Image: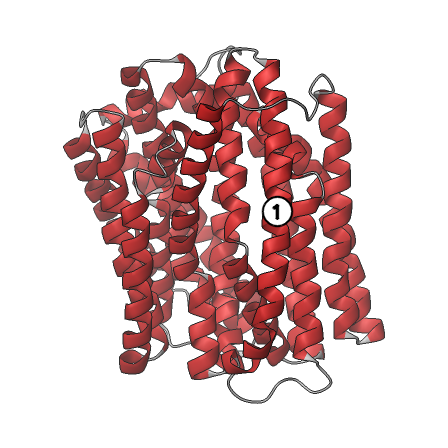
Amino acid sequence: MKLERTKNTKRNIIIGEAEKLSGIFLPFVVRTLIIHQMGASYLGLTGVFYSVIQMLNLAETGFGMAITYSMYKPIAEDDAKTINALLLFYARVYRFAGAAMGAAGLLLLPLLPRWIKGEVPPGVNIYGLFLIYLFDACLNSFLFPEKKALLAAYQRNDVSSMVHIFTQGGMYVLQIIAICLARDFYLYALTVPLSTAAYSLLCAREAHRLFGQYRNEGALPAKNSWEIRRQVAGLLLRRTASLSRNAFDSVFISAHLGLAVAAIYGNYYYVMDAVVMLLAVVKTSMAGGVGNSIAMETKDKNLKDMKTIDFLYMGISGWCAVCLLCLVQPFMELWAGAEMMLPGFFALIFAAYFYLLKMSDIRTLYAESVGLWWQARHLSILEAAVNLFLNWLLIRLMGLPGILYATMVSYFIFNFIGGALVLFGRYFDRAGRTEYFLSHLRYALVTALVGGITYAAAAHIGVSGMPGLLLRGSLCVLLPGILYFLIYRKTGEFGTAKPVLLRLLKFRERGHNI
């Protein structure tokens, strides 16, 4: 079966962006209420516990992505027997992983006080709170994870996104009630597993409605089972590298600088991550279509598509990075107050950090669709090891900026450069490798130029407060777009990307595939 990739991508982006917008605005309201009603240390504590759970939940991303990847080919070939066997295999392995995660979490309970510097918020039992978050993580492994993978493989993320909007919205409403009326942090935390259970059950119902022809039955051939295990091992290592630049960072900050600094850092990271999530919808929405393209199209066609998508994606990413550079400080002052702000140069650090993370997204999307996790295992190990060492060293030498520098250095060397070498060496046969690196150098220089001009223009806006933020925001929306257009309008990349963009915007006839 050849999926309608452009149509599915467009639909998934629209619904996915609605999901992410609701997932940004409502948590923003909740975080604001916690800061002003209960105190920033509660946010710091929650961030640390989420980070610890992420460490334990290594298997979640590994199994989910491996099974979704393994479904691309049987879906393209209408092989229902293999899909059924994959669903059963996935359900069994995932539940085993969930049980192992729960056991590991219980063993870590005595270590929790060591990861928290300073006083714990009054009236909070860190063990009970941690168990609530651990229970939530285990629910994901036991409540129909294979059904959610089936939706993703068929590029129906719009369905799971709609369910998530509904269940997540209900959770945040309950959290607001728990904070404002009950003033009970445990009730706030209990809404999380409640929402997870509702989301998993509703996704399972929708997957059965759309793809009721599939059942959890049958056995995978030994060759298929071994290949999945190998890919999962590679994904687990990649997941470790990802955690070394996310969850481990928060734990280092809490253990060395305290919950208050962890909360302030968490606010900045939340703003950056909100933009990351919006762009992640674009990547996730294309995943099924790219996987289908890998199975159905030639390497030359896929390389051409990757270059086109990468150009469009980095243009959007650069635009977002400029907005972060110019807006994060005035937004923080308005939202959390001057006492919850970092020095001004952190705006540049977070903007650069964000842009660097986005540089690998499209290349990663194609590497995941090809299934190159095992081939990149050594890079994942090196990235995690180097990042952890640099975290330990630089936080002592530089304080908080050292955490960000450590992540950026290790990510650039092992993920961006190393990951690209694996994809071009293992799949594209080195074709276009030099052009890929030169293109990204050009994209980064153009973004730096656009960012510098926009920042200088925004600095001349002498209005503070909400009017000043709105004026700067309007400038950041208009000026970078004009500058990017003027710089790129006569390039071959823009000429190639324009028809794709128009198709996504419905200005061209339907039915075309990227």
Q: How is the image coloured?
A: secondary structure
Q: Residue at x 56, y 71 (%)?
A: 108
Left or right of 201: which side holds 48? left
Left or right of 189: which side holds 8? left
Left or right of 444: which side holds 111? right
Give percent across and percent down for residue 364. Answer: 36, 38
Q: Residues within 10 Å of mark 1 (few under 14, many from 20)?
A: some
Task: From this view, report whether residue 55 is shown above or below residue 252.
Answer: above
Q: Of 141 and 427, which appears nearest the observer?
A: 141
Q: Is residue 464 among the parts visible in the rendering?
A: no
Task: From this view, report whether residue 332 is shown above or below residue 125.
Answer: above
Q: Which residue is mark 1?
A: 96
Q: Residue at x 46, y 33 (%)?
A: 228
User: In the structure shown, which secondary structural element does the residue marked by tag 1 occupy?
Assistant: helix
Give percent across and percent down for residue 467. Answer: 55, 64
Give percent across and percent down for residue 375. Answer: 30, 37
Q: Residue at x 50, y 52 (%)?
A: 58
Residue 179 position by quadrant: bottom right
Residue 52 position by quadrant: bottom right
Residue 294 position by quadrant: top left
Q: Is residue 376 among the parts visible in the rendering?
A: yes
